[in-house]
Amino acid sequence: MSPLNKPEMIPVGVIKPPYTQLKTRTPIPMASPALDLTLIASGREAFAAFVGDDGTQEVMTQLANEHGWSESRVLNGGVTEAIQVLADVPTPELLVVDLTGADDPLAAIDRLAAVCDENTRVIALGELNDITLYRSLIDQGVEEYLLKPISAPAIEAAVTAAPRQKGSATQEVKNGRQIVVVGARGGVGSSTVAVNLAWLMATDQNLRVAVIDFDLYFGTIALSLDLEPGRGFRDALANPGRIDGLFIERAMVRVSDNFFVLASETSLDQPVDFDPVAAEMLVEHLRQEFDCIVAEVPRGLLTAYPSLLSAADSALVVSDLSLAGMRDTVRLAEFVKNAAPVGALKVVANRAGAVKKGELSKEEFQKTADLKIDCVLPQDLKPAVDSVGAGKPMAAVAGRSKVVSGLRLLSRELSGVEPVASTSPLKRLFKR
């Protein structure tokens, strides 16, 4: 029966078909003779793949064998052939389609949606390394988009991953906040600020938080927590095709139920082939799994790849109160505003009072830079020393210090979690 006569079989939540096309779309030509319609029988199959090259066909055949699916469901072709075949037969529960060669991949997915049955899971493959395309495909209901050449582990992870949440059109999709932290200069304590903000969000606010250290050579976030960095982070940033839920789970180091770290300690003789699209895809995946993502990005990397700021909800520039720090804060603030105009810019003055002579006051800094300082953190050596000795964030070993008090207020502002107002007279008395 033609899908024009069975609108009740429109996919719900997995593929979002253009409903207006159901009555107006151009008739699809009959399937190519090379595609045998009898391979997809009248009953609904568990799996079918339409892939065009020998390497991908080999990987998909291996996948089929491992799951007990028939190899005959791995068909030669791409999304156009998939539309032709599936227009007249029930669509499988899992459908893998190759978008390679499609002039307009998004339009092709729209046409595919119009012939898909209810609850068909779709995994798309392609050669176009474009974060905008990835986001658009996911928004249209495609469950995953993998870059070719695909590997067996990558497609296995995509197939076995929990399906994306289905439900009504009004159901809220989780999209965690991204906070980018950058130091105006080296040695101003941006790593300390980043790791303590993340720890406070995870512990005090009970949020699920991931902290990412994008300094792959000299990052200190894992070191400050006495952690061995996970494996694979560097490779994933060079190869977006490796980024999937299974990889992220293996590459991240779990500190607690709510607190995870993604870092690397790359050997200095190993070059890093940094792909900004991979970094964006990584953050996009994490935003589906975490309430907040705190990413510390070296200023050189940030200025080289401004797209790292494109989806940020907030950007923190951390500086000391030196003249050089003020100059570089002004330059970075202007850069951040241009790169992420929708994100909130905040300036953190760290280690205030560390230098008795030559340090600017808060007022002098703000007036000369024409920037507001949102948070001033005083120099406090004892909590810093205790933190290093314990291998824990300063907030974990000196929760009542002035530094941590300032970071706690900032963490709530960044996460959007409002402090619970106390109605206890006893607590109000102690607060006074």
Image: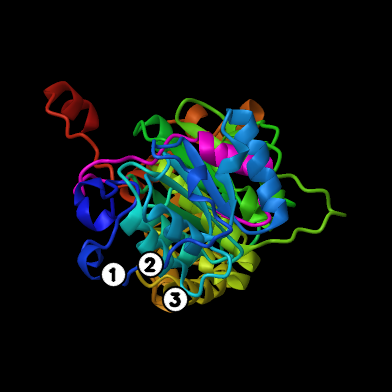
- Of badges 3 and 1, the one in the foreground is 1
Q: Disc count in the image? A: 3
Q: CA distance from mark 1 to mark 2?
A: 8 Å
* Callout 2 touching callout 3 (CB < 8 Å): no
Q: Which residue has dot 1 on it?
A: 25
In the rendered structure, find residue 229 and report the number of the disc placed on it. Answer: none
Q: Which residue has dot 3 on it?
A: 369
**Element type where label 1 sits in the image:** loop
Q: Callout 2: 10 Å neighbours few (<14), some, many (20+)?
A: few
**Mark 3 or 1 closer to N-term?**
1
**Element type where label 2 sits in the image:** loop
Residue 275, image quadrant: bottom right
Q: How is the image coloured?
A: rainbow
- Please report the residue visible at 74 percent of the width from the left and 52 percent of the height from the top: 217
Majority secondary structure of the magenta segment?
loop
Q: Which residue has dot 2 on it?
A: 28
The magenta span reads 146-173
* Callout 1 touching callout 2 (CB < 8 Å): yes
Q: Position of residue 136 (x, y in %)?
A: 40, 62
Residue 225 part of the magenta segment: no
Q: Position of residue 25 (x, y in %)?
A: 28, 70
- Please report the residue visible at 36 percent of the width from the left and 31 percent of the height from the top: 206
Q: Amino acid at mark 2?
A: Ile
Residue 313, image quadrant: bottom left
Query: Which residue is at the front of the view, 24 or 135?
Result: 24
Q: Amino acid at mark 3?
A: Ala
Q: CA distance from mark 3 to mark 1?
A: 58 Å
- Please report the residue visible at 81 percent of the width from the left and 59 percent of the height from the top: 271
Can the viewer see residue 247?
A: no
